[in-house]
């Protein structure tokens, strides 16, 4: 016969167990992932990253001739260069949608640059990785000024407070180090892909999973088609970002850097170390972290290149080979917006 005391102990135990269960399921991401059957990043490496194509998906037959004879669609090392009409979104989405990926999107907005966040985020919600999980990480010294933007399903935003810096050059030089920390302490096991984006920008058209790759660079709008001698690489041998005049593939814009977390980590860590050496030697590369990025990409080739459709400039006339502008730098008054000349 159960006594009253035994029953009390029994029910207390049940209630404690239920409370523990609820607490654990709220606090443990492992638990919620397991409940949702979301694979760990390691499992994804093995299985999910295969380009599995669902049986019975209708799509056009690929052409054997080039769909874009007017532009180069591969680099010398056979990395694709992504242009409109070089990919079939039906096929891309059939492959990537089922991978249930999360794209971490890192944006710096310090000082007056917070004013660009609203347009950037609102346009991203319309055009950027729509239908995929996106986690924005906004790094700012003015967290209270981050605008409230309505986010779609599967999309979230985290604000990270950082110290104010009074030189714009310093803000740019420190980007690599901050991205390195964020990946190392937060994103390695949370994100499948990463993009770092300039905040003074806006999305105008589709930007989707065709942009994903192990290491992704973008061809700078102002230097596309220029000869390598004209690229604004760092030309002083004293800097770690030095590139000789007779070397160089493309001029890459630092406004867009992408890839798998471990690949981007290697990039930002290497650039940060080179920046540290330059700092110790009291030399600042001509285009700050962009010069170091260009050096990195010269000797560590990106696996996917995004055409200038993915980094245009509102001030620039659109040539006929540009069938679409997806993402573009907005016009700004440098003297008014930057903390120093
Ligand atoms: C299109 C492109 O590739 N742009 C690059 C270019 O000039 P940009 O003129 O595009 O540089 P920028 O003034 O937009 O600065 C780059 C980014 O740093 C952040 N920021 C900068 C200043 C500030 O006071 N607060 C703040 O938050 C913000 O995210 C901004 O978008 O060269 C810079 C280095 O000199 C960077 O490599 C930029 O990515
Ligand atoms: Mn910019």
Image (cartoon, rainbow, N blue to C red):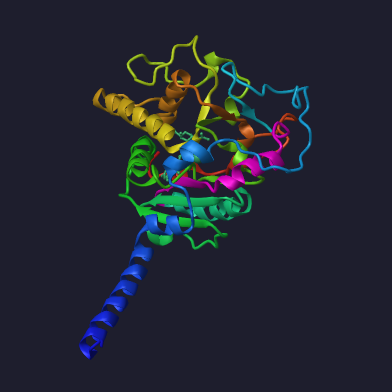
Vertical order, 183 against 300 (above or below): below
| Residue situated in front as seen by the camera: 121 or 333 | 121
Q: Residue furthest front?
A: 1
Q: Which residues are magenta?
A: 84-111
Residue 138 colored in magenta in the image: no
Front residue of 8/317: it is 8
Task: Work out which residue is located at the far bottom of the displayed protein and give it.
Answer: 4
Q: Residue at x 49, y 22 (%)?
A: 301
Above or below for 285 versus 195: above
Q: Say whether residue 93 is magenta.
A: yes
At which x and y percent is residue 22? 36, 70
Residue drawn at 55 percent across, 63 percent down:
150
Is 133 placed left or right of 287 in the picture?
right
- Quadrant hosting residue 172: top left
Q: Quadrant of residue 290?
A: top left
State whether residue 311 appears in this view. Answer: no
Residue furthest to the top? 246
> Residue 36: horizontal and vertical position, in percent?
49, 57
Quick one: which residue is furthest to the left in this view?
Answer: 5
Which residue is at the front of the view, 56 or 253? 56
């Amino acid at each position: 016969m159960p006594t009253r005391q035994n029953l009390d102990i029994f029910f207390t135990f049940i209630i404690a167990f239920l409370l523990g269960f609820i607490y654990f399921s709220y606090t443990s991401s492992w638990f919620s992932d397991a409940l949702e059957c979301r694979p760990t990043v390691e499992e994804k490496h093995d299985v999910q990253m295969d380009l599995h194509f669902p049986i019975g998906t209708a799509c056009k037959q690929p052409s054997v001739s080039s769909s874009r004879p007017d532009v180069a669609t591969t680099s010398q090392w056979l990395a694709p260069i992504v242009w409109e009409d070089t990919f079939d979104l039906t096929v891309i989405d059939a492959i990537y949608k089922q991978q249930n990926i999360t794209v971490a999107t890192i944006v710096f907005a310090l000082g007056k640059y917070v004013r660009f966040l609203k347009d950037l985020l609102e346009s991203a919600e319309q055009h950027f990785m729509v239908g995929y999980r996106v986690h924005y990480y906004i790094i700012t010294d003015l967290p209270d000024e981050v605008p409230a933007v309505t986010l779609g399903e599967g999309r979230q935003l985290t604000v990270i407070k950082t110290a104010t810096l009074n030189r714009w050059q310093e803000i740019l030089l420190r980007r690599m180090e901050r991205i390195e920390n964020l990946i190392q302490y937060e994103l390695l096991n949370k994100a499948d892909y990463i993009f770092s984006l300039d905040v003074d920008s806006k999305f105008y058209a589709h930007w989707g999973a065709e942009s994903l790759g192990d290491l992704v660079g973008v061809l700078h709008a102002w230097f596309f088609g220029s000869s390598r001698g004209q690229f604004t690489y760092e030309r002083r041998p004293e800097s770690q970002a030095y590139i000789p005049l007779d070397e160089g593939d493309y001029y890459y814009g630092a406004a867009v850097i992408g890839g798998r977390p471990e690949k981007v980590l290697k990039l930002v860590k290497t650039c940060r170390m080179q920046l540290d050496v330059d700092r110790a030697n009291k030399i600042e590369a001509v285009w700050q972290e962009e010069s170091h990025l260009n050096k990195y990409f010269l000797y560590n080739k990106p696996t996917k290149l995004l055409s200038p459709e993915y980094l245009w400039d509102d001030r620039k006339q659109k040539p006929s080979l540009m069938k679409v502008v997806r993402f573009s730098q907005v016009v700004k008054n440098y003297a008014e917006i930057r903390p120093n000349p």
